Amino acid sequence: MNKARKFIMVVVAVVTALTLFQGALTAKAAKTTVNWFVGLGTGGNPEQQPVEDAVVKKFNESQSDIELKIQYVDNKVAADALSTLIAAGNAPDIVGPVGFSGANGFPGAWLDLAPLVAKNKTDMSVFPESLVNIYKEGDALVGIPFAVFPGLIYYNVDLFDEAGLAYPPAKVGEKYKLDGKDVEWSWDTLATIAQKLTIDAAGKDATDPAFDATKINQFGFVHQWGTIRSEFSTFGGANVVDPKSGKVVIPENWRAEAQWLHDGVWKTHFIPNETYGASDLLKPSEFASGKVAMARVMLWYTCCMADLKSKWDLAVPPSYKGQTYAPVDADTFRITKATKNPDAAFKVLSYLLGDAELDLITAYGAYPARPDLQKASIEAKAKLYPSVKNWDIVPEMLKYSVAPSHESNYPNFNKGQDRFAAFRTLLYGETGKDMDVNKELDKLQADLQAIVDAAKK
């Protein structure tokens, strides 16, 4: 072989190699990058990240069109980091898991998923309509159910047995047996039995004229770790800002709950006030102390029941005017409106809510919205808490999800929530004893209107 021929063959080989290499680069460059931001809610803990990394790896290996990248940001600075990215035009495509409060800090930032749901023929019928509705902002669908935590009644079986009282109902519409009669399981009924379960140092219950409210050793009920909006929502949901008038309205059902709550704290004394709530009597938390007979709290509270030495079980929330309402805490993944690749982002979202959901739900310690995954989740909880018999309540309560959500968005959300919290502190604190509930609600309404108007300006 002469030198010229050898040279030509080398050139051909080099060109071929370069062509193949360039083709590989082009193919790699042709991949659509989808960025997943983790930290605005859960997901950033060291024990969770390996699961999420494996989810990313599995997705990238499953197809050749999209490269999924994950970014972890400490929860303490995640909101500021996301704000910076959005302002710089580098918003991630997907954010989550994140609850409503975290997402509400970024009004107008989330993509309406309804067109993509329709385009991809995503089956939303597997979820109760009331649950889907909590993810709606006006006509826009900003999330798909993922991790859900309905509000339930936790009750101390031992305290009910000691008082000789029937257990609260395990089904919506079931009557409660009180003094030998079947009565509606309403919030008024709960208040009645909660007084019987509130005991002072002398062993007298709150229905006894000699009961000493300054020396209570056991309470009948608590809205545990609640917010005033979630407590309001046990009497039915409402928008903070009326969509028709554009005005802040504290509706009658919320006013009724506030009065019910005030009476329970300060008149009939079956709900601990702020002083009792912070006392050693109710540590490490109200229901887990064994000194509270019933708590209305979200399902995620099963994380923290190891300290309770008593047997306990679950019951359905009472009704208000014949209707049952279950406020729901909910986390999901959201797509940012700034995404340059909505179709690719939705494909990733569908994967996170599909093939990857069981791994992610397990890592987050959450309850799945998908019915096909709920049995395994409950079986795991049942092994931890053998006294609980009424796990069937959990999926049933999702049918009674309150919409609008108790965390639904409105202008100047964070400042508004601070004002709601101040009202709750006023009611539960020593200042609540002599407060005029409706007068304070009128003031709350006026203050919220000013907060909302400031955001519009």
Image: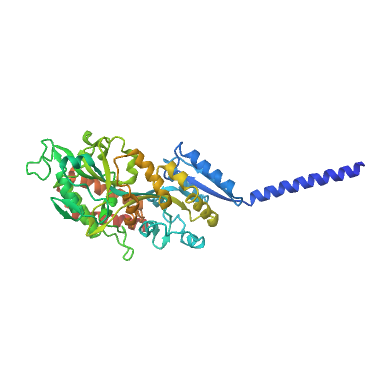
Image quadrant holding the C terminus, namely bottom left
Specify whether 189 is left or right of 385.
Answer: left
Query: Which residue is at the front of the view, 383 or 408?
Result: 383
Query: From where the camera sits, is residue 457 visible?
Result: no
Percent coordinates x, y for residue 139 in the rendering: 41, 63
Tell me how the rendering is colored: rainbow
Specify whether 414 is left or right of 159.
Answer: right
Specify whether 54 is left or right of 408.
Answer: right
Q: Residue furthest bottom?
A: 244
Percent coordinates x, y for residue 133 in the rendering: 37, 59
Query: Which residue is at the front of the view, 33 or 189?
Result: 189
Query: Which residue is at the front of the view, 380 or 9?
Result: 380
Query: Which residue is at the front of the view, 307 or 170?
Result: 170
Query: From where the camera sits, is residue 305 visible?
Result: yes
**Number of numbered tags placed on the structure image:** 0
Percent coordinates x, y for residue 258 in the rendering: 21, 52
Task: Locate residue 135: give its quadrant.
Answer: bottom left
Q: Residue furthest right?
A: 2
Q: Residue furthest left?
A: 210
Q: Vertically, is 118 above or below 443?
A: below
Specify whether 365 is left or right of 349.
Answer: left
Percent coordinates x, y for residue 450 in the rendering: 30, 56
| Residue at figure coordinates x 53%, y 48% from the top left | 35
Image quadrant holding the N terminus, namely top right
